[in-house]
Image: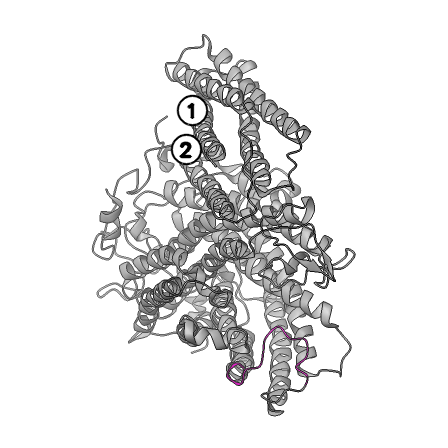
Amino acid sequence: MSLFKQLTDKPWERKGVIGGLRPEGVFESPPERVALGLFLTVASVIFSLLAVSYVLRMSLPDWTPLADPSQLWLNTALLVISSVLFQWARNTANAGKQKNLMTAFVGGGVFALLFIAGQMLTWDNLQASGYFMASNPANSFFYLLTGIHIAHLLGGLWVWSKSSIRLISGGKPEDLRLSIELCTLYWHFLLIVWLIMFAMLSNT
Amino acid sequence: MAYVPLADQDAETEMHHPHSWVTKYVWSQDHKVIAIQYGGIAIAVGCVALVLSLLMRMQLGFPETFDLIDPSSYYQSVTMHGMIMVVYLLTALFLGGFGNYLIPLMCGARDMVFPFLNMLSVWVYLLSVLILMASFFVGGGPTGAGWTLYPPQTSMAGTPGNGMGIILMLVSLAVFIVAFTMGGLNYVTTVFQYRCRGLTMMRLPLSVWGILVATILGLFAFPALLVSAVMMLFDTLLGTSFFMPAIIESGTPLDYDGGSPILFQHLFWFFGHPEVYIVALPAFGLVSDVLSTHARKNIFGYRMMVWAIIAIGGLSFIVWAHHMYVSGMNPYFGFFFATTTLIIAVPTALKVYNWVLTLWEGDIRLNAPMYFAIGFIFTFIHGGLTGLFLGNVVIDLPLSDTYFVVAHFHMVMGVSPVLVLFAALYHWYPKVTGRMYHEGMAKVHFWCTFIGTYAIYLPMHYLGFLGVPRRYYAMGTTDFIPESAQDLNTAITIAALFVGVSQLLFFINIFWSLRNGKEAGPNPWGSASLEWQTPDTPPAHGNWGDELPTVYRWAYDYSVPGAHQDFIPQNTPESEEPTVDDQHFDPDHDVSKADL
């Protein structure tokens, strides 16, 4: 039943059990996926507000664009590989296969860790070249945006590490299917956020 | 992975049975215990804010008489009073307290979807409160920047608490937002996914609708506060210039350049205005249920009430700049925000009409919760009408920095939600504790609070028209403020002290009644909604015993023609003739008519 139809329902007229076991309006999805969807919306609001602030602050006269560090391309590649590996793990788990599942899932997280190491290296290099956090708002935003993105990745890695331990200690793919699927969704989301952020940082 | 209906889930795996005193009352994953923990912390910290307001009133009413606070601690009191009341008391008590208690019970669920996350939420909330309270004990004291924390003055010398005070405030807010997000994800997912058999969205009581939409607002609005708090922390700690402009402090140029204080204001109010409705919408929902139950009549215009809650929630995101008229903006922007502000009055007024029409020809039972609920209608109309004045740019500009604004927002989002809180606390007290509160004491509490708050805030409107500026530690002597204004200020302070002290009645009542109150029975008000139909009172762990309820009707079947009693519980099948016995309704315990 569509949302609009639900909202126009006249509850004082309809009596009896509506919808049987599944009450109308319940999403055909486990609650974890619904909650993650909701969280991704919240995270999108955070990143959108940061983007709006970035654009507004950019228009002020003291803005000096940051030289785009070439290392970011390598970091982007690491995150793309991480996301691809998660997708591979999800497909494998959905097919109920065990083969390569551990490689793909654990590998996905390891590449995310490498991405974080790469970002930190980029920070180091920027500092060494004199692009300090407080020296220009463009620099400040670079550190802030990448930092908040890393914080989100770390949250994902916490869930990933719990699932990885279960997988390594002999967990069945069926039991881990939901965790793997949600990790994959989260990683794709953070990849998209990073790509938009990277495009924004490189073009301004 | 397919959806598993709630009714088919293994009850044992869902219930997280506590095994010791600690897991039952401290590290509890039971939504009811968590609700009481949330409520207890919120009310405790609210008392701190209440005491701060009385200190301020003592200074304003009797300047140069008492030596309780100096100008610095006055500003610190203003700031902490505002922030604690809005965020740490009202938001936490409505959503963390009532949301936690009522959502699973009204949805016919055993608990929240993620009980562990729920437990984490209340402890992280406590952490945020402790961080905030810690700022009273650091060098320089808590921040005195005003609850809006506008830069650049927040971190400039001359503003009290510009060192550790502001840092602790920002960290505490960030931690609070983490706690709220954990709780909020739980509330929304539980309402969507854990409704029992037959419970459609449009059969939910309005309390759940109010809490649901307010939580969604919070999930979208709090990120703005988080982003601005993090950016301001960077400005304060790391020397960035997100918000800090080039500025001179005591003759010395500071190391900031080019930041935009207005950007902070936009971010803050993008959170700040929806925050008003994060507090108001649960109040709207709860008061609707209290009015309907005690008027023995279905809520008037249920669908309109739901649509109004959703419409107000949506509109609340496009009115924020009406808080910034005096900051200066493009006149077209001002026109836009004034228009949207006036439009939001339409669904709000609709709700007020529906509350009044619910009372119309109802079989009204003037129990204490009903006193508070009807009192709310009065205070909310008064606060709402002055909002229509202030929503217009030309009227707002001269009144913005006067006591008129103080009177307006205290009536609309101070007194009104607090009256609903008391209505709801008294209304659900018998379910939470199994005992009745003392009716007479509750009614005395009502009259002291209701008349007392009017005595405080009505004269403030007049002070505002006189041009008495708000935020001032002392008025001094000015030509445009007559001496009689000071008499009024004294009277307001006396009323404030009276209201403050009379809140003791509430505490005495709820603690005294825990042991000495009459046994309430499962459904003392004869309420139709699901939370009153639990097999145990107070509800046991798991809420519903062996079998989850099935819902056959909406939550407002009161005074149905032809029915044997004046309410039909939601879980009564259509074919079953409702009788006194099978509704767990014991006439000996029918205290709803006790005082009539």
Q: How many marks?
A: 2
Residue B458 sits above or below residue B100 on the image: below
Under mark 2, the amino acid is Arg
Point out which mark residue A33 bears: 2
Q: Residues within 10 Å of mark 1 (few under 14, many from 20)?
A: many
Q: Quadrant of residue A147?
A: top right
Residue B304 sits above or below residue A60 on the image: below
Quarter of the image containing the N terminus of chain A? top left
- Alpha-carbon span between mark 2 and mark 1: 9 Å
Q: In what element is the residue under mark 1? A: helix
**Residue B315 in the image: x percent, y percent?**
36, 58
Q: Confirm whether the magenta stretch covers residue B466.
A: yes
Q: Quadrant of residue A136?
A: top right
Let me know if marks 2 and 1 both belong to one chain: yes
The chain letter for the residue carrying disc 1 is: A
Q: Is residue B62 visible?
A: yes
Q: Which one is earlier in the sequence, the residue at label 2 or at label 1?
A: 2
Q: Residues within 10 Å of mark 2 (few under 14, many from 20)?
A: some
Tell me whether the residue at label 2 lies in contact with that at label 1, contact meaning CB atoms closer than 8 angstroms: yes
Q: Which residues are magenta?
A: B464-476
Prevailing secondary structure class for the magenta stretch in the rendered image: loop
Along the line of sight, the residue nearer the viewer: A59 or A151: A59
Q: Is residue B377 visible?
A: no
Point out which mark residue A181 bears: 1
The chain letter for the residue carrying disc 2 is: A
Q: In what element is the residue under mark 2? A: helix
Q: Is residue B353 left or right of residue A195?
A: left
Under mark 1, the amino acid is Glu
